Image (spheres, rainbow, N blue to C red):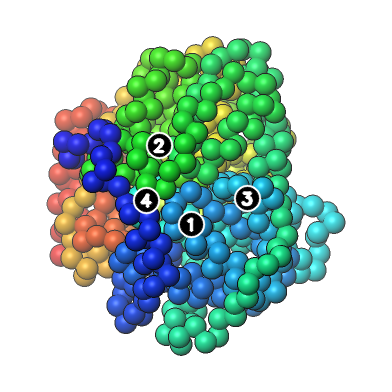
């Protein structure tokens, strides 16, 4: 961690917006260079125009590939599109519209020219597809979100949400990326583009905000009179928080309504970069300074699919801690949910959630990393809550039907206020009660060096190939290479003992693998788990 972490950004830290935009339009990717090809990760294609990883040709080709994909899938309804506040999002949005209009796609842009959060796009897709008048035939809707999420200001991002409203699965993204790279290799000759002179509009903000009353208890929040602070961190939720305040009569302050593509008002993240991560103590340092001014203070990232929860008594909550509290509260206060509705978590999320699930008598549904895995369960109501350790989650409406199938940071931030209003306690106070009941886990993610060949071996590693039978003094009870919830490959391994576990997964961008580890026996035991995890994994992939 750099010694500048948590300190205000200085002029030397800021991007040159003009240079960034020029590079977007002028640079042409060379598809023979891997770093300049279209590559979809867990949340779409991301990169910077300055290193020719996110440029006009990438977006034109990717949009055409999405058009070709939806045509092949028989998707002929409207395409809902929104963008966040990153500097590259506006030109990428323009490029995408030119291609969509050139292909005669019925595209829906924001009615008021507003920024559009990821959950608002998911909500719009589901609202259209769940409308009885739109069912049948091929008139299903899908969407695009132009965002690199919490990534630094120089980055751009582009992701596709199919008709289920959530992140596209690997089959779809692999096809789209492959087709996009073919189009780039062909000089874009098969890309159709036209001036987007007239497109349809949709009130993303109004529809989303009005419908929130069906998933959050605003009456309880209003009656309590609690003081709420919401910081959009310069992101797409900036216009939404004021609308929520006005619609539901809340004592809510938009802490910082400023939008600045350089994010000059941010404090630097752990590595000295500007990054709008609401779960990072360093990035949220200036927000946390105001914790005494509010009963609940929250933050969102640039596309509002992540949340950060700040309380007067504890400051910024660890995302794992808040997920555990949210789960215990929701499953005790949502009588409209199915009695057999499971609790969804990714396999690198805290085992505190496992213990909460057991105490609630609810089935735990553990899946690989990636919110896409929760989509089917949220759609049919068999999973009422899905959450990731990286501060992304969503849950069902009060009547047990689907709300969003993508992460919703606005929703989880509002839930913190509902929890405070209904229980009279902050989420951090409630987490202390969980610790008293279930124990106090120590959790950390670290990186370990690995070559490309070693990362490839880890991604395909079978749990049975691990020869160790103990983990930091405890018998190993499980060696997993597939997720218990859906039997999907986890792209690595997870090793479990009674009071600890670790998971190892290769990085997609660096020559390292990630070790997630947790122990209910304290920090010293966690260090032993981490050290043994590295030995176990290195022995298995060498």
Q: Distance between the residues labelled 4 and 1?
A: 10 Å
Residue occupying the point 35% across, 22% down: 289
Label 3: which secondary element: loop
Q: How far apart are marks 4 and 2 (CA)?
A: 15 Å
Quadrant hosting residue 168: bottom right
Which of the two discs, 4 and 2, labels the residue nearer the N terminus?
Answer: 4
Q: How far apart are marks 1 and 3 (CA)?
A: 13 Å
Q: How crowded is mark 4: few (under 14 residues within 10 Å), some or many (20 or more)?
A: many
Q: In the image, which is nearer the foreground, mark 4 or mark 3?
A: 3
Per the rendering, the mark at residue 278 is 2
| Left or right position of 351 against 379 | left
Label 1: which secondary element: helix
Per the rendering, the mark at residue 89 is 1
Label 4: which secondary element: loop
Q: Where is residue 42 in the image (x, y as percent from the top left)?
A: 43, 58
Q: In the image, which is nearer the foreground, mark 1 or mark 3?
A: 3
One can see residue 522 in this view: yes
Residue occupying the point 43% across, 43% down: 260
Relative to residue 222, is residue 321 depicted above or below? below
Which of the two discs, 4 and 1, labels the residue nearer the N terminus?
Answer: 1
Q: Where is residue 521 in the image (x, y as percent from the top left)?
A: 24, 28
């Amino acid at each position: 961690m750099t010694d500048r972490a948590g300190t205000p950004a200085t002029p030397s830290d800021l991007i040159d917006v003009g240079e960034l935009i020029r590079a977007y339009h002028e640079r042409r990717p060379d598809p023979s260079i891997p770093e300049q090809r279209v590559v979809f990760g867990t949340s779409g294609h991301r990169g910077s125009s300055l290193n020719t990883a996110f440029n006009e040709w990438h977006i034109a080709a990717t949009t055409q590939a999405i058009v070709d994909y939806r045509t092949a899938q028989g998707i002929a309804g409207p395409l809902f599109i929104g963008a966040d506040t990153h500097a590259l999002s506006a030109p990428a949005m323009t490029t995408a519209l030119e291609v969509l209009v050139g292909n005669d796609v019925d595209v829906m842009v924001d009615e008021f020219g507003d920024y559009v959060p990821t959950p608002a796009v998911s909500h719009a897709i589901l609202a259209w597809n769940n409308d009885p008048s739109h069912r049948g035939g091929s008139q299903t809707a899908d969407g695009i979100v132009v965002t690199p999420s919490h990534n630094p200001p120089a980055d751009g991002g582009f992701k596709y949400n199919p008709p289920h409203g959530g992140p596209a699965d690997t089959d779809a993204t692999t096809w789209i990326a492959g087709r996009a790279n073919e189009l780039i290799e062909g000089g874009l000759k098969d890309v159709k583009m036209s001036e987007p002179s007239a497109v349809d509009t949709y009130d993303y903000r109004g529809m989303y905000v009005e419908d929130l009353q069906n998933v959050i208890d605003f009456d309880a929040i209003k009656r309590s009179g609690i003081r709420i602070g919401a910081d959009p961190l310069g992101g797409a939720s900036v216009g939404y928080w004021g609308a929520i305040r006005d619609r539901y009569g809340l004592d809510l302050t938009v802490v910082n309504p400023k939008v600045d593509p350089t994010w000059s008002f941010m404090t630097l993240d752990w590595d000295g970069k500007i990054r709008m991560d609401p779960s990072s103590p360093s990035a949220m340092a200036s927000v946390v300074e105001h914790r005494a001014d509010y009963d609940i203070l929250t933050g969102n990232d640039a596309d509002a699919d992540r949340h950060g929860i700040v309380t007067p008594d504890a400051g910024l909550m660890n995302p794992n801690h808040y997920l555990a509290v949210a789960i215990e509260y929701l499953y005790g206060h949502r009588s409209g949910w199915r009695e057999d509705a499971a609790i969804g978590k990714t396999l690198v999320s805290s085992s505190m959630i496992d213990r909460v699930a057991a105490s609630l008598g609810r089935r735990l549904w553990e899946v690989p990393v990636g919110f896409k895995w929760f989509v089917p369960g949220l759609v049919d109501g068999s999973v009422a809550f899905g959450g990731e350790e990286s501060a992304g989650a969503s849950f069902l409406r009060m009547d047990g039907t689907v709300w969003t199938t993508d992460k919703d940071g606005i929703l989880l931030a509002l839930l913190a206020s509902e929890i405070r209003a209904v229980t009279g306690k902050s989420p951090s106070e409630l987490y202390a009660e969980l610790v008293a009941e279930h124990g106090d886990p120590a959790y950390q993610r670290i990186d370990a060096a690995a070559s490309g060949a070693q990362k490839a071996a880890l991604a395909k590693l079978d749990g049975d190939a691990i020869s160790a039978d103990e983990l930091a003094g405890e018998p190993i009870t499980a060696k997993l290479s597939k997720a218990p919830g859906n039997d999907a490959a986890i792209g690595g391994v997870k090793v479990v003992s009674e009071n600890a576990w670790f998971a190892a997964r290769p990085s997609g961008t660096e020559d390292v693998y990630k070790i997630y580890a947790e122990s209910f026996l304290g920090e010293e035991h966690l260090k032993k788990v981490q050290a043994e995890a590295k030995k176990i994994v290195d022995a298995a992939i060498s």
